[in-house]
Amino acid sequence: MITLIGKELAKEGVSFIFYGAVEECSDCRFKASCVDSLKEGHRYTITEVRDVEQKCPIHECEKVKVVVVENGEFTILTDSKGIFEGSSFDFNRKGCSNKDCDFRDMCFPEGISKEEKGFYVKDLGKFKDCPCGNSLEKCIVKIHD
């Protein structure tokens, strides 16, 4: 997928979460190729930076570059049942009562909504440090396009 991103951020391998368009984007002639192609709340990873720049008043140096992005990968903690590399999953984590857990951001990562469908990229093995004693697996996952 092609989009535009601030010139300073336009580097292969950089991941970002799209939080939505700002008001200035509504009248921009590049809106369709910039923000309309992205889904709010999703994580993307830049896979290619093209040598094309455009002016953009909302970015720091007032320039954006054309980039190719794909859905980003996440390292998560999830229930240990049914994890096979390449298999699909529905991301519907159950609640957790431990709001102060050091690992909460891996169980409920920003950039994946509850109804997401994706696949397991890599199983990193059992996670034995859950303070609640849950049987968890550490995995790298990717959301389907």
Image (cartoon, rainbow, N blue to C red):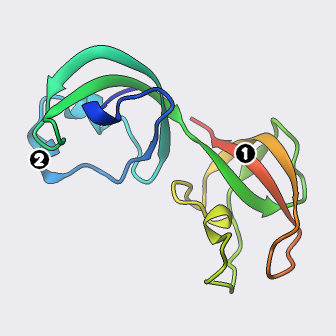
Q: CA distance from mark 1 to mark 2?
A: 36 Å
Residue 92 vertical placement versus 4 (above, below)? below
- Quick one: label 2, few (<14), some, or many (20+) residues within 10 Å? few
* Left or right of 125 on screen, residue 115: left
Q: What kind of residue is marked 1?
A: Ile
| Residue 132 position by quadrant | bottom right
Residue drawn at point x = 30 percent, y = 38 percent: 36
Residue 97 vertical placement versus 7 (above, below)? below
Q: Mark 2 falls on what kind of element?
A: helix
First-in-chain label (1 vs 2):
2
Residue drawn at point x = 80 percent, y = 74 percent: 130
Residue drawn at point x = 47 percent, y = 26 percent: 12
Residue 65 vertical placement versus 39 (above, below)? above
Camera-side residue of 89 and 138: 138
Q: Position of residue 68 (x, y in %)?
A: 42, 23
Query: On the image, numbered disc 1 is attached to which residue?
Result: 140
Q: Position of residue 41 (x, y in %)?
A: 44, 54
Q: What kind of residue is marked 2?
A: Glu
| Residue 100 position by quadrant | bottom right
Residue 78 vertical placement versus 63 (above, below)? below
- Quick one: label 1, few (<14), some, or many (20+) residues within 10 Å? some
Query: On the image, numbered disc 2 is attached to which residue?
Result: 24
Quadrant including the C terminus: top right
Camera-side residue of 100 and 17: 100
Residue drawn at point x = 88 percent, y = 68 percent: 128
